Image (spheres, grey):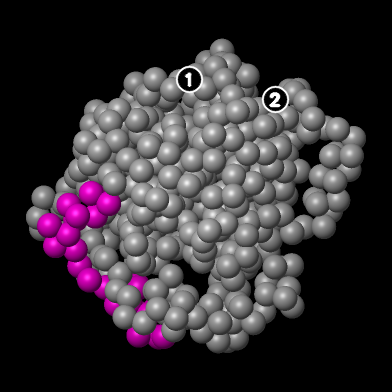
Amino acid sequence: MATLDDSVSIGGVALPNRLYRAPLLECAGTGSDAPERLRAALEPTAASGVGLVFQGATIVSERGGCAAPNMTRFHDSEFVARCARVPDAVHDHGGRVFVQLAHGGLRSLEVWHAAYRERNPGLVQPAVSRPPWQLRLLDRLGVIDLSPSVLSTDGVYDLAASFGRAAAYAVDAGYDGIHLSGANMSLIQQFLSPLYNRRTDEFADSVRFLEIVHDAIRDRAGDVPLVTKVPAETAAPRFVRRHLSFEDGVEIAERLAAIGFDALVPVEVSPFWDMSVVRGAYPERAWNAADLRSNLDAAFGSARNARVVALLNRLQSRRFEREPGWNADFCRAVRERVDVPVLCEGGVRERATCDALLGGDDPACDLVGMARPFYAEPRLGARLLDAADRRALCESCNNCTVPQVAGEPGRCRTPPVVRERARLEREGEYDS
């Protein structure tokens, strides 16, 4: 029976324990200070004993593709080389760090962020196929601004090559592995999803794109450990009839393991960017924050649009259940069919939940991850790995997520949580 303290390996890379920091938005950008900002965000987690740290969604293209403001890009080899201080810092504490590579496709800023479009006119979005009617309707209503360019077959191969180049730059800089953003309405999920993928060439096979990305990374970066999220679109709204079922997700995972992926992260999500990803309370404090108001209005195009989005946010907060480890059933079904490590994340907040997911007669996974709790407690690992009765301070209130729409860095903004962390710091709870 495995516990959180037990060692494990992914693709030959040994990890000291089974706790990982799931990918988050560091919002470090690509400026001269970006490498230091990334190090400052990730090193405390490694210092707290967490075995595996994922650097969050990092874009592979030079222009476009960012799903949120101030995301980091890994298209330039000189910039990535300066990010070597990140793996160096993590390694100094005995941890390992993988970088998550991504492209937003139809979820990119140029679709939904009005102020970004004004600053970057003429950007088009690479699309797998003609956008689904739901997005075209929002475009006609003026909620988003679609300017899609359906990828040619050669264009798909060029896009896969950009993942390979970024992975090679990361390996040269000392990163230990690659994580692909295969869910959360990323371009990879758009290839996998029948809602988006209606192609007639070889990429009508939804897994084919991930296969050539795998090959591009292997060709350029060697046998670096390669992980991807695997979506099942079980949280799709009722008006979406074409989506990935639970069984589809399990089949995709099985095929990816056979292709040669070294670990899988099964997640139950929607075909859209919604609260199926960040389940929890409606972030009322963030929506009402006076210092964010003008930036939120600019992001959504007007105060009216921002209020509409806030209302939808409130409604969705009531729709999705928050059962700790909400991806556990999907992870367990995948784990029964593959022979590579399975990673489970989604609403996990207690050490006891971690050990339950890892142990028992029918384990759900081989590693357990948390995301938002590391905004609240960057050195959370010191507490969770210290005793079996520990719980993260994170309240899943989502007041950390809305400010990122305005380009703010990811951090906890809930006063009671911030005060409690300060108390624990004074008492030395993070020093072990």
Q: How many marks?
A: 2
What's drawn in magenta, residue-wise?
133-162
Q: Which residue is mark 1?
A: 14
- The residue under label 2 is 385
Residue at position x 74%, y 35% in the image: 391
User: Is 294 drawn above or below residue 215 in the view shown?
Assistant: below
Task: Specify the quadrant of the image occupied by residue 333.
Answer: top left
Can you say which quadrant of the picture contains the C terminus?
top right
Q: Nearer the viewer, residue 93 or 298?
A: 93
Indicate the quadrant where residue 104 lies. bottom left
* Residue 201 among magenta residues: no
Q: Is residue 368 left or right of residue 81?
A: right
Residue 376 vertical position relative to residue 405 in the rendered view, above or below: above
**Residue 40 against residue 105 in the figure, above or below:** above
- Give how far across and how far down residue 11 sits, in percent: 37, 24
Residue at image coords 57%, 38%: 21
**Considering the numbered disc 1 on the image, is that residue within a helix, a strand or a loop?**
strand
Q: Secondary structure at mark 2?
A: loop
Question: Disc 2 marks which amino acid?
Answer: Leu
* Left or right: where 394 falls relative to 28: right
Three-letter residue code for mark 1: Ala
Q: Is residue 278 visible?
A: no
Instruction: Name the dominant secondary structure of the magenta segment.
Output: helix
